[in-house]
Amino acid sequence: MANSFLIRPIEPRDDAAIAAIIRSVMPEFGADGAGFAIHDAEVDMMSTVYAQPRSAYFVLEVEGKVLGGGGVAPLENAEPDVCELRKMYFLPEARGLGAGKAMIARCMDAARGFGFKRCYLETLTGMDAAQALYRKHGFTPLCAPMGSTGHHGCDRWFIREL
């Protein structure tokens, strides 16, 4: 596989691929029970949901195939300057290309453009590579969740200044 990749805004034609990626990657980490994003209604219509104000979702494309994605949106029931890094998942073949770093940068740029000052994210024990990536890019651990994502299955929370 080539080490080149493209990060671009999601389009309606990407919805099925992104839904399949989310439903493939989350169980890999035991995140398929109640209280995880895999059950969110938006999974099947990501392009529509992230067309809302102050929201953006990007897909990772390698050799013309969608292999991952990530986005930002306002954190529900939180201060208006806080966004959430949401649904950032990559298939195994997309890992190790530097795409995670690039996706975080793209999402943080979008968040700053929407006027957010802080970015929150939730993850879980066992997603060690993801947590290392988040820490490397300025996210620091929190002791408790913020907002009301409905993802009570997550047990690790992070925040960073934008």
Image (spheres, rainbow, N blue to C red):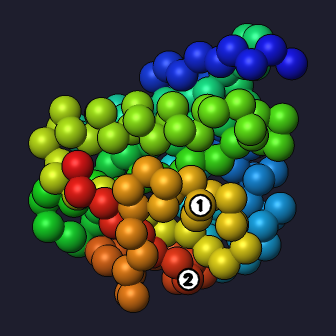
* Residue 93 position within the rendered picture, expressed as x and y whole percent measured from the top left: 84, 35
**Quadrant of the image occupied by residue 59:** top right
* Residue 120 position within the rendered picture, expressed as x and y whole percent measured from the top left: 35, 63
**Mark 1: secondary structure:** helix
* Residue 86 position within the rendered picture, expressed as x and y whole percent measured from the top left: 47, 52
**Looking at the image, is mark 1 or mark 2 nearer the viewer?**
1
**Badge 1 density bin: few <14, some 14–19, many ≥20, Cα 10 Å:** few
**Quadrant of the image occupied by residue 160:** bottom left
Amino acid type at circle 1 is: Ala
Label pair 1/2, CB-CB below 8 angstroms:
no
Residue visible at 29% across and 33% down in the picture: 110
Q: Earlier in the sequence, mark 1 or mark 2?
A: 1
**Mark 2: secondary structure:** loop
Task: Judge whether residue 52 can be spotted in this image.
Answer: no
Q: Which mark is residue 155?
A: 2
Residue visible at 53% across and 38% down in the picture: 101
The residue under label 1 is: 132
Residue that extends furthest to the top in the rendered view of this protein: 64
